[in-house]
Image: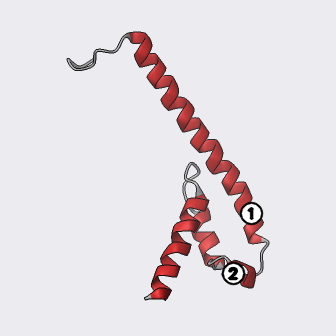
Amino acid sequence: MTALDHRTPAARADAVAVRATDTLRGLLRALANRREMTRLSDLSDRGLADIGLMRGDLHFARRAPLGVDPTARLAAVARERVHSLRG
């Protein structure tokens, strides 16, 4: 406890519980999105191109650590591709 930490032990425990819950929610969301990404693999190359992706982007996103949301990586790749194509 630092000199500036004036929270009660109960308040600190609540903060830890909130952080743990948020972390668990994020992990569960990332795992659910990872499962959904499997559905993207079923699309044709043309179908992927329609949403701004290439098959290699799926492989790139799949290599993300388990707790990282792969769909966030896919969205970033698609945005970068759009910006590079626009000049």
Q: Please name the residue shown 57% across and 43% down the image.
A: 26
> Which residue is disc 1 drawn over?
38
Q: Nearer the viewer, residue 62 or 2?
A: 2
Residue at far front of view: 86
Q: Position of residue 38 (x, y in %)?
A: 74, 63
Where, by quadrant of the figure, is residue 43 drawn?
bottom right
Q: Compared to 31, does 13 lie above or below?
A: above
Specify few, some or many for label 1: CA neighbours under 10 Å numbering under 14, 14-19, or 20 or more.
few
Q: Nearer the viewer, mark 2 or mark 1?
A: 2
Amino acid type at circle 2 is Asp
> Quarter of the image containing the C terminus?
bottom left
Mark 2 falls on what kind of element? helix
Image quarter of residue 12: top left
Residue located at (54% from left, 35% from top): 22
Colour logic: secondary structure
User: How dense is the environment of label 2, judged by Cα within 10 Å: few (below 14), some, or many (20 and up)?
Assistant: few
Rendered location of residue 32, percent (x, y): 70, 50
Q: Are marks 2 and 1 in contact (CB under 8 Å)?
A: no
Q: Quadrant of the N terminus?
A: top left
Q: Earlier in the sequence, mark 2 or mark 1?
A: 1
Q: Secondary structure at mark 1?
A: helix
State whether residue 2 is above or below residue 21.
above
Q: Which residue is mark 2?
A: 50
- Residue at x 70% of width, y 78% of height: 48
Say the numbered circle drawn on residue 53.
none
The CA span between labels 2 and 1 is: 17 Å
Question: Looking at the picture, how far across and down is residue 71, in whole percent?
Answer: 61, 61
Tell me which residue sits at (50%, 87%) in the image. 85
Query: Is residue 59 left or right of 14 when viewed as pictured?
Result: right
